[in-house]
């Protein structure tokens, strides 16, 4: 399972990196999104994969911390998703404004050979 997730993270990040190097602003924004998804998945998986493990159990006696799912990576990823959504919205507004001012969506503002 870990191998499949590692390959998925690598493919997401590699695809995002390839798109960031493209000449169009929409492709750059899409690449940044893919890279942020890969990082979020990586952080989430660092909390270990638990199947049917409760995040918190209030029972009798001293609880064993090894039987609980770690809530910190989940909270970090949730925060990163919210920040990523706001950043993407800002990027899109700036992209639309730059296209209106320059008349092109090329990263350096000049149409050229791709």
Image (cartoon, rainbow, N blue to C red):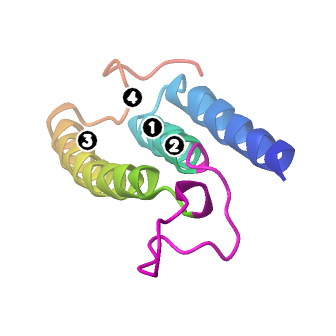
Q: Separation of disc 3 and disc 4 at Cα?
A: 10 Å
Q: Is residue 52 magenta?
A: yes
The numbered mark at residue 6 is none
Residue 56's spot in the image, x, y percent?
A: 44, 72
| Mark 2 Cα-neighbour bin, 10 Å: few <14, some 14–19, many ≥20 | some
Q: Separation of disc 2 and disc 3 at Cα?
A: 29 Å
Name the residue nearer the viewer: 36 or 24: 36
In front: label 1 or label 3: 1
Query: How many numbered badges does the structure rendering display?
Result: 4
> Which residue does the image show at 25% across and 41% down from the upper left?
95
> Which residue does the image show at 15% across and 43% down from the upper left?
97
Name the residue nearer the viewer: 52 or 86: 52
Q: Is residue 69 magenta?
A: no
| Mark 4 Cα-neighbour bin, 10 Å: few <14, some 14–19, many ≥20 | some
User: Considering only vertical position in the picture, is 96 above or below 75?
Assistant: above
The numbered mark at residue 43 is 2
In front: label 2 or label 4: 2
Name the residue nearer the viewer: 34 or 91: 34
Q: Which residue is mark 3?
A: 95
Q: Which residue is mark 4?
A: 106
Instruction: Give the residues drawn in magenta, as a range.
Output: 45-67
Residue 21's spot in the image, x, y percent?
A: 54, 22
| Mark 1 Cα-neighbour bin, 10 Å: few <14, some 14–19, many ≥20 | many
Rendered image quadrant of residue 110: top left
> Which residue does the image show at 39% across and 29% down from the upper left?
106
Q: Separation of disc 2 and disc 4 at Cα?
A: 33 Å
Residues marked 1 and 4 touching at CB (< 8 Å): no
């Amino acid at each position: 399972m870990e191998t499949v997730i590692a390959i998925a993270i690598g493919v997401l990040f590699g695809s995002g990196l390839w798109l960031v190097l493209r000449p169009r602003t929409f492709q750059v924004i899409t690449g940044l999104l893919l890279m942020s998804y890969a990082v979020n998945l990586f952080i989430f998986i660092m909390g270990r994969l638990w199947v049917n493990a409760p995040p918190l159990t209030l029972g009798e006696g001293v609880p064993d911390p090894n039987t609980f799912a770690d809530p910190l990576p989940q909270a970090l990823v949730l925060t990163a998703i919210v920040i990523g959504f706001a950043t993407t919205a800002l990027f899109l507004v700036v992209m639309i404004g730059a296209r209106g001012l320059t008349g092109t969506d090329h990263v350096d503002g000049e149409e050229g050979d791709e």
